Amino acid sequence: MEAVRQQIAAMRQSFFDEELLDKYFIQLEKLEEMSNPSFVEDVVTLYFRDSTKLLANIEEDMEKTPVDYMKLDRCFHQLKGSSASIGANKVRNEVNKAREFCRAGNMEAAKASFQQLKVEHSTLKAKLQAYFQLLAEVVESD
């Protein structure tokens, strides 16, 4: 079990080393208490549920002619805020890039940046799911 704990610690540290997550994730962890041991996982699960819908809406809106830049900007703004609130650093950075390209009217660059945003989002989701799965194994064995 100690090996699993070390694996969890190393995995968690890699999130920060790779700048996938930032200090806001640590603040989220500090909110977790014994009375609600799955608080962080619950918040992250909600984030991925909502952000996945937002990504689908953004993708749809980017394909419309003419593009409603105001609507797109609102969706990006919402995604940026929710990503920042859980500390999803790389996702937030890609949101900012795509949003800037949209504001500049450079739809091709915005679409390319959006594809990178989806990659960062799915990478973070997969890594956090594996992390929470390991955490659950430790909790079950305690």
Image (cartoon, rainbow, N blue to C red):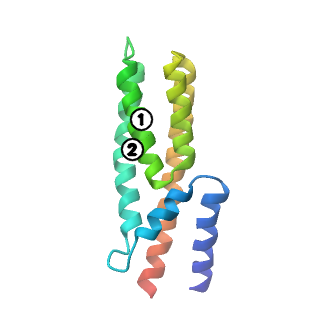
The residue wearing badge 1 is 77
**x%, y% of residue 104?**
53, 17
Mark drawn on residue 140: none
Residue at the top extreme, as displayed: 66
**Which of pointers 2 and 1 indicates the residue nearer the eye?**
1
- Name the residue rendered at 55%, 37% in the picture: 94
Which class describes the residues within 10 Å of circle 1: few (<14), some (14-19), or many (20+)? Answer: some
Within-10-Å neighbours for mark 2: few <14, some 14–19, many 20+: some
- Amino acid type at image mark 1: His
- Quarter of the image for residue 90 reads top right
**Position of 94 compared to 77: left or right?**
right
Residue plotted at (34% across, 46% down): 50
Q: Nearer the viewer, residue 80 or 113?
A: 80
State which quarter of the image contains the C terminus. bottom left
Spatial separation of the CA atoms under disc 2 and disc 1:
12 Å
User: Dot 2 corresponds to which residue?
Assistant: 51
Q: Is residue 7 left or right of residue 41?
A: right
28 is higher (above) or lower (below) than 67: below
Q: Nearer the viewer, residue 59 or 87?
A: 87
**Looking at this view, is 50 or 130 the one in front?**
50
Q: Position of residue 121 (x, y in %)?
A: 50, 45
Image spot of residue 123 (x, y percent):
54, 49
Q: Above or below — where is 116 with respect to 47? A: above
Tell me the kind of residue under disc 2: Ser
Image quarter for residue 33? bottom left
Q: Residue furthest right?
A: 17
Q: Secondary structure at mark 2?
A: helix
Q: Residue furthest bottom?
A: 142
Percent coordinates x, y for residue 95 in the rendering: 51, 36
